[in-house]
Image: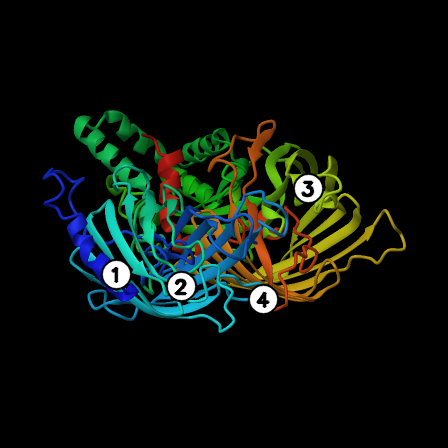
Amino acid sequence: MSRTRSTLMIFAALPVLVSPSVLSDTSGSFWANNTEFRHSMAQTGGSGLLRTPHAQTLGFGQISLNYHLEDNVDLTTGYSRGAHDTFLLGVGILPHVEFVVQNTHKEINGEAWKTGSDLSYSAKIDAAWLIPQDWFQLAFGLSDFGGQANHHESAYAVVSKQVSDFRFSMGYGYNPTDSRHQMGPDYLSGVFGGIEYQPFSWLQLVGDYDGTGMNAGAKLFTPQEWLPYGMSAHLTYQAYSDSNTLNRDNQWVGLGLTLPLSGPNAAPRYSRPQSHQEGVDQQEPTLNLRKASTVAQVSSEAEPVKAVAVNVEAEKTSSTHSLTRLTQRLTQYGFENVSVGTRQDELVVRLENNLFNVNEIDSLGVVLGLINEEMSQQRFAFVLLNNNLPVVKVSGTQQDLKQLFDKDNLTQIPASTNLTITTNQLYKALDDVNWNSNKQNSHLFKPRVIFSPSLYSTIGSEYGVFDYSLALATNVQVPVWTGAMVDVRHMLPISHSDDYADGERFGNSRHTSTVDRILLHQGVTLPAGVMAQISIGQVGTNYQGGTSEFRWQTEQGTHKFGFEASYYRDKRDQYDDNITPVLGSYRYYLSQYDWALEANAGQYWAGDKGFTVTSKHWFGDTSVNIYYQHTDKSFAGLSFSIPLTPRKDMAPAPIQIRGIEQWTYGYRTMVNNSSNDLNGSLAATSDLQHNLDRGYYNRDRLSASYIDANVVRLKDAYMTYAMQK
């Protein structure tokens, strides 16, 4: 029987196999069909059917984690040929754009150069922004682009159309004439297609033709009410294949989990279309706000209004009393350097936040909410300090705050606020103030002990899927005067893989027990809104010298310019060349998608000259970074930056112990060369933990445009951490 005829017979059999008449007639939502097709990753390349892509992409802000186990894996052949297992990670990096990293391997820890592994990148973009959804879906994709050691290289266009409980997909793919594709030289070479049948929201039967043969199987999804915060798990089973590729006429099974990168509080915000006028977080309230609104409504219906509330309002009429009470509440809460005063009919508050280290916008929400509760003046100005230096001012009227923190309708989020937000010329905001209290709860000489993992690793090399050296980094930071911070870090080795052992391939790169950073930082504000910092001491265990850094951003924070210059020498060899990196940088922020485009250029740590371009995508407090670097060699990479500490840390009195607010892990691969060699020394920077962006500007998110785009978080922070229940 011909392959074409067998393909048609299997496609025709799909609806019969799971016809509702075959299944028991059980009522309930579990058996109800959801007309929206659910989707998961194909075996390779990204979202799709079994072995082919469809025209749908991962949702904006979603991450999909998958592991696929394949039958007929032959350990006697190299990793570039035949059946393999796959780690696959996909991210909905923008609306309609999916970015995927995959690692294929035959053994997790196989013999070097025989059963090693291969790392590749893929991308897909759909045209839903152009074509009405009820017409059809169209998408274009690339797999394993860049470099020369490519084993999954292909390009394709695919169209999908849903008809009732069926979705039909057909596409055309291209492989190079000298294709070394692991799936076979005929894979996605020419016409491909498939059919999905979804009789219930948790079940799909799938068949597809990938160019090498026909595949058939099923997918199971967790019902949407089983997992919290928009998470979804799935199981894929390919039961049949007649692929003409050696050892690929087989079965495979896959497990996957899809979840929102923005975290549980922000889960609903990314499930809506984006408009030009609105920021990424403005329309939908967080889950916390929804819950609080329900609780508040029940409480208001159950309890009568008490006379005490009238007394509270009466107390607010006394200006002195309200200033004293606000000072007490802010200091008792744990804020530092608290100053409260008046300037004519304006309330002025100045303080330092070391509680909400993950995102300082949370501290703004808490403080503004407390000001709203206590202020008796018609206007207010709030200046946030970092290391006793002013970094942002928020000002407005009492009515502005009442509109934002309206307790009677917690889920009502204004499309915009009338608050004025600025990061420039901040000392003028503190002129002529009559302080009722000044610098209460000083921040000085309170050690901040910050724990974080330090991980050196290689992924997808010929030596194995994952080799690593893991250490515990203990960082002690002590503020000693305005703008000055003592910064010491110790590395304690914990574990390492075989290839990081003595005498092995990566043995010389393993962690050692050492103090690898001793620095004194001095920050200072300069005229015209310029911020500067000088750092002097020792980095990387053996390099002594210093780094100077300058930063300026526009009034709204849309544009930022930076400059960094360093001078270090290796204390082990006085005749060795000095380290003299010099870099200029620029960043453009698109508030609509919480998206920053960054570039730096100049001379890097190892003396190599070139540039780095980064696309940084924020989802809550997690950033996904896609970058391209070119100096002596070219690299492409993907990294994730996540907080490893609670949203609100312990109060720093007399000492603060916490996790790190930004831990970054990722991987890059060499491109545009004859091999994908490892080279970690090129395009390296000083990478100070206490730099201007992290130490003063909220991981480069302290600006009017960012705060306006995330106004819902102000209300969420106040409701979660400060509102009197």
Separation (CA) of disc 4 from disc 3: 27 Å
Q: Residue furthest bottom?
A: 177
Disc number placed over residue 500 in the picture, else none = 3
**Labels 4 and 1: the sequence-earlier one:** 1
Q: Which residue is mark 4?
A: 148
Q: At label 2, which amino acid type do we have? A: Lys
* SS at badge 2: strand
Q: How is the image coloured?
A: rainbow
Dot 3, how many residues are within 10 Å of its Cα: few (below 14), some (14-19), or many (20+)? many
User: What residue is shown with label 1?
Assistant: 6
SS at badge 4: loop
Q: Are marks 4 and 1 in contact (CB under 8 Å)?
A: no
Q: Which residue position holds label 2? A: 124
- Residue closer to the observer: 310 or 610: 610
Mark 4 and mark 3 lie on one chain; the one further toward the N terminus is 4
Q: How many marks?
A: 4
Dot label at residue 389: none
Contact between marks 2 and 3 (CB within 8 A): the answer is no
Residue at 82% over, 57% down:
578
